[in-house]
C-alpha cells in the first residue's frame, strides 16, 4: 500500500462548509467596503488652472539646454534610479582614470 492510501482523506463536507463560511465573511466585508465607499463624496477633478500652475513649477530651470530637459524630468521622477545611475557612472569613471 502506498502512503496516499494510508493517510486519512479530509471530509469533503467539512471543507465545503469551511469555504461557505469564508465566502460569507468575504461577502460581509465587501458590503462594508461598499458602504464605506458610498459614504465618501465622489472624487473631484483638479481644476485646469491648478494643473497649469503645477506643470509650470516642475519645468526645467531657465537656461537649461533642450537636450537635458528629459534627463531633468527623469531625475525628478525617479530619484532612486538616478542615484544608482550616478553611482555606476562614478565607479566606471574611477576605473577608467584610476
Image (spheres, rainbow, N blue to C red):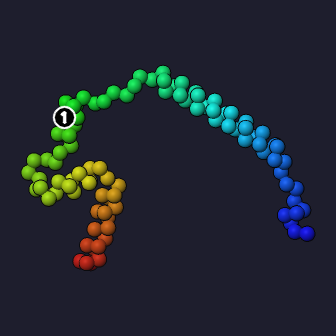
Q: Indicate the quadrant where residue 74 lies.
A: bottom left
Camera-nearest residue between 16 and 83: 16
Along the horizontal axis of the image, is 30 left or right of 55?
A: right
Give the x, y percent position of residue 79: 31, 53
> Considering the image in quadrants, where does the C terminus appear?
bottom left
> Considering the image in quadrants, where does the N terminus appear?
bottom right
Q: Residue at x 81, y 43 (%)?
A: 14
Q: Indicate the quadrant where residue 50 lies.
A: top left
Q: Residue at x 53, y 28 (%)?
A: 34
| Above or below: residue 84 compared with residue 42 | below
Along the horizontal axis of the image, is 15 left or right of 74?
A: right
Task: Tell me the crowding category of disc 1: few under 14, some 14 to 19, or many 20 or more residues within 10 angstroms, Cα based.
Answer: few
Give the x, y percent position of residue 96: 25, 78
- SS class of the residue under badge 1? helix
| Above or below: residue 92 compared with residue 48 | below
Give the x, y percent position of residue 77: 29, 50
Q: Residue at x 17, y 45 (%)?
A: 59
| Above or below: residue 94 compared with residue 52 | below
Along the horizontal axis of the image, is 65 left or right of 2?
A: left
| Above or below: residue 87 compared with residue 16 | below
Camera-nearest residue between 8 and 70: 8
Total marks in image: 1
Give the x, y percent position of residue 63: 8, 51
- Report the residue marked by disc 1: 53
Q: Indicate the quadrant where residue 80 lies.
A: bottom left
Q: Residue at x 16, y 57 (%)?
A: 68
Amino acid at each position: 500500500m502506498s502512503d496516499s492510501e494510508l493517510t486519512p482523506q479530509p471530509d469533503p463536507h467539512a471543507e465545503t462548509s469551511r469555504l461557505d463560511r469564508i465566502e460569507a465573511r468575504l461577502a460581509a466585508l465587501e458590503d462594508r467596503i461598499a458602504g464605506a465607499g458610498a459614504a465618501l463624496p465622489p472624487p473631484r477633478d483638479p481644476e485646469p488652472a491648478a494643473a497649469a500652475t503645477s506643470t509650470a513649477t516642475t519645468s526645467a530651470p531657465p537656461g537649461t539646454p533642450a537636450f537635458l530637459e528629459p534627463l531633468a524630468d527623469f531625475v525628478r521622477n525617479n530619484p532612486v534610479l538616478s542615484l544608482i545611475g550616478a553611482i555606476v557612472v562614478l565607479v566606471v569613471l574611477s576605473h577608467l582614470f584610476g
